Image (cartoon, helix red, strand yellow):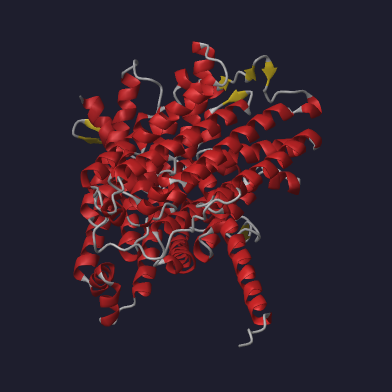
């Protein structure tokens, strides 16, 4: 019993940082209606900034294109912990102000999709910049100096580092301070008034934008301080620390994105339970070697959404803005033949790097098509397409090697398994949408990665799993070849054929009654239900089609590698895929094709003659933010708009040049 109590108390450190991060999420949501998925990533960047100031007095610069760091002190000197802390908090406040002013203030009246996409773009940018600036420190878990006492004390009969108690005390102080600020001060009351009615706050003489800016500054300071204080306990890494956003979202959701007290208690409780799950995993040898602790937030989020979710948005709820235009597919057969033919010609005539680019483009476009169906056509924001692709990929390997199923039966059945997993993970979509669904699917992606894709029996562990090449009627369709013959054109042609078939299916669905029902649900669920549309069936059918397409893409991605590992399906890859799909045009088939071209390692990479890099990753994040703010229809939508404007100008000129009839 004391052993379990000790692990629960050891979890106070992780619970404290979850609680403070969740409090920051509540601040930004109450002031501007934004769930900031980049909140923990911003705290991670701020923590690395503090480390650099303490290490040698250098300031890390977060802007791509500028020098990585700026020396503020002569060589051999460094800032004291107090001075470095003050500078770091001031920078954190500045970062919060910049993020609000440049990214989220222009999106005040935008739909939830644009806000989520901008937040994910910021997440990708901060993650890439932190990797670039942290250097070798970013490759491993850093252990900064302790700022809190670390001696061991006895609590309830168990030994515990004293810093855990200090962290809980800090959480209590922060929670009490925020509660007092927002219930007693004029600033807090004004923020609450603006959250209820911006017009009412303006009539009372308050600026909602200024109130939101101050809240963003406070949230950024909290994020930075929390990560700096807890880093000596949990360690610090760009990817691992940034993923603390998932349990923080679970805690904020339990608090209804409004109650600081419930949020703090939930954060501490999640941290303690995660620590105890680590203990149980070590004690119970029959449990599979998976990350049970990382799967806990998904369970919390799923239960909370099912418990609190509403089947329809309230009558007074308005989203503002509009979704990207979903154009009616035209001349699909002609364009499919032309583009597929061009791809086949390229595979048969171009060099190795170009063939590899065409294959990557085709596979990425197929998975991006799953995002177009679910997010573009139905407005359901899903952040787990590559997690489902990973499930299908490893399922196909198991079906082929252990069961003996041949191609193409094994990949098709694996895609069906991915569809089933997608339906289970997307169950909250029946009751929620928008931001809440994005939270649920992000947590589901992390849970699938930790519970399924890191299961040694299923995926082969660190060594991965060998992928048997596809063959049909004795014809080798695999990618493997020696020298300049790699990759084989036969595999590229297989990818193009599968993509063309998927495009034809999606185009027919979009033009038929199913597509009209999807768009009706995306536009207004209440009106769609009143018109006789089965909203639940429409949502689940979109999840099924989307998950099946993602599964097919995952099987092709598996065939693309001789040895497949879980690193091919990490959650950040899903976010990057959503980024390029939104850039291409998330509500059109052409947008999925553009996403394939823009993908790292795709045709664009081959044309530029370069390899994927963190700089390209960062620029992708910036482009995503810019498109979300300036042009939500993406690149393909921009081209279509320009063409329509040009046609209208020609029509006006033709009309003006036509002489009036003589009467």
Q: Is residue 642 above or below residue 48?
A: below
Is residue 395 visible to us here?
yes
Give me the residue at 29% from left, 57% from top: 527
Residue 28 at what x, y percent from top left?
A: 35, 61
Viewed as shown, does residue 556 lie left or right of 90? right
Residue 289 at what x, y percent from top left?
A: 41, 22
Viewed as shown, does residue 106 lie left or right of 615? left
Viewed as shown, does residue 499 lie left or right of 302? right
Q: Is 348 or 292 nearer to us in this picture?
A: 348
Q: Is residue 44 above or below residue 441?
A: below
Q: Quadrant of residue 419?
A: top left
Locate the C terminus and report the quarter of the image it occupies. Answer: bottom right
Residue 146 at what x, y percent from top left?
A: 41, 46
Q: Is 331 or 394 nearer to us in this picture?
A: 331
Q: Is residue 241 above or below residue 531?
A: above
Viewed as shown, does residue 617 lie left or right of 606? left
Q: How many labels sit on residues?
A: 0
Is residue 161 visible to us here?
no
Q: Is 45 or 332 nearer to us in this picture?
A: 332
Residue 312 at what x, y percent from top left?
A: 26, 52
Question: Residue farthest to the bottom?
Answer: 663
Locate the N terminus and report the quarter of the image it occupies. Answer: top left
């Amino acid at each position: 019993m004391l052993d379990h109590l000790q692990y629960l108390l050891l979890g106070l450190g992780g619970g404290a940082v979850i609680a403070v991060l969740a409090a920051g999420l509540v601040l930004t949501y109450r002031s501007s209606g934004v769930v900031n998925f980049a909140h923990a990533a911003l705290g991670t960047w701020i923590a690395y900034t503090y480390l650099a100031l303490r290490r040698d007095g250098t300031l890390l610069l977060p802007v791509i294109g500028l020098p990585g760091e700026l020396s503020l002190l002569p060589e051999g000197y460094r800032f004291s912990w107090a001075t470095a802390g003050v500078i770091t908090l001031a920078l954190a406040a500045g970062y919060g102000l910049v993020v609000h002013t440049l990214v989220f203030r222009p999106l005040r009246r935008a739909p939830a999709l644009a806000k989520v996409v901008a937040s994910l773009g910021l997440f990708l940018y901060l993650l890439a910049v932190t990797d670039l600036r942290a250097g070798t420190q970013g490759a491993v878990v850093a252990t900064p100096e302790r700022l809190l006492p670390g001696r061991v004390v006895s609590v309830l009969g168990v030994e515990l580092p004293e810093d855990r108690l200090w962290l809980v005390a800090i959480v209590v102080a922060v929670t009490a301070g925020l509660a007092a600020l927002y219930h007693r001060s004029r600033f807090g009351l004004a923020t609450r008034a603006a959250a209820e009615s911006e017009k009412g706050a303006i009539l009372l003489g308050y600026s909602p934008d200024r109130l939101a800016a101050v809240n963003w500054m406070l949230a950024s300071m909290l994020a930075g301080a929390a990560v700096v204080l807890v880093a000596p306990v949990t360690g610090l890494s760009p990817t691992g620390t940034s993923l603390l956003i998932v349990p923080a979202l679970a805690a904020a959701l339990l608090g209804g994105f409004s109650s600081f007290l419930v949020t703090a208690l939930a954060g501490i409780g999640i941290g303690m339970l995660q620590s105890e799950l680590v203990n149980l995993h070590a004690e119970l040898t029959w449990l599979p070697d998976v990350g049970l602790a990382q799967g806990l937030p998904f369970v919390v989020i799923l239960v909370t959404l099912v418990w609190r979710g509403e089947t329809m948005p309230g009558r007074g709820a308005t989203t503002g803005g509009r979704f990207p235009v979903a154009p009616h597919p035209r001349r699909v057969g002609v364009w499919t033949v032309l583009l597929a033919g061009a791809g086949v010609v390229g595979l048969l005539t171009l060099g190795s790097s170009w063939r590899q680019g065409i294959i990557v483009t085709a596979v990425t476009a197929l998975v991006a098509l799953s995002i177009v169906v679910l997010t573009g056509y139905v407005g359901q924001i899903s952040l787990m397409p590559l997690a489902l692709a990973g499930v299908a990929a490893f399922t196909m390997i198991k079906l082929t090697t252990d069961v003996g199923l041949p191609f193409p039966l094994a990949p098709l059945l694996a895609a069906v398994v991915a569809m089933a997993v997608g339906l289970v993970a997307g169950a909250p979509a029946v009751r929620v949408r928008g931001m809440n669904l994005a939270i649920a699917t992000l947590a589901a992606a992390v849970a699938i990665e930790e519970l399924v894709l890191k299961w040694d029996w299923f995926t082969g562990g660190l060594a991965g799993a060998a992928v048997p090449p596809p063959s049909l009627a004795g014809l080798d369709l695999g990618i493997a070849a020696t020298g300049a013959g790699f990759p084989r054109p036969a595999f590229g042609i297989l990818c193009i054929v599968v993509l063309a078939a998927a495009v034809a299916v999606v185009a027919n669905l979009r033009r038929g009654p199913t597509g009209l029902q999807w768009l009706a649900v995306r536009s207004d669920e209440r009106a769609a239900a009143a018109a006789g549309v089965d909203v639940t069936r429409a949502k689940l059918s979109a999840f099924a089609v989307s998950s099946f397409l993602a599964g097919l893409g995952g099987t092709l991605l598996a065939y693309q590698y001789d040895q497949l590992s879980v690193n091919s399906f990490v959650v950040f890859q899903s976010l990057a895929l959503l980024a390029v799909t939104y850039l291409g045009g998330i509500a059109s088939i052409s947008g999925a094709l553009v996403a394939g071209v823009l993908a790292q390692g795709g045709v664009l990479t081959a044309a530029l003659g370069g390899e994927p890099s963190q700089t390209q990753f960062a620029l992708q994040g910036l482009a995503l933010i810019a498109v979300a703010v300036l042009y939500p229809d993406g690149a393909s939508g921009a081209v279509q708009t320009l063409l329509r404007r040009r046609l209208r100008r020609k029509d006006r000129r033709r009309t003006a040049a036509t002489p009036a009839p003589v009467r």
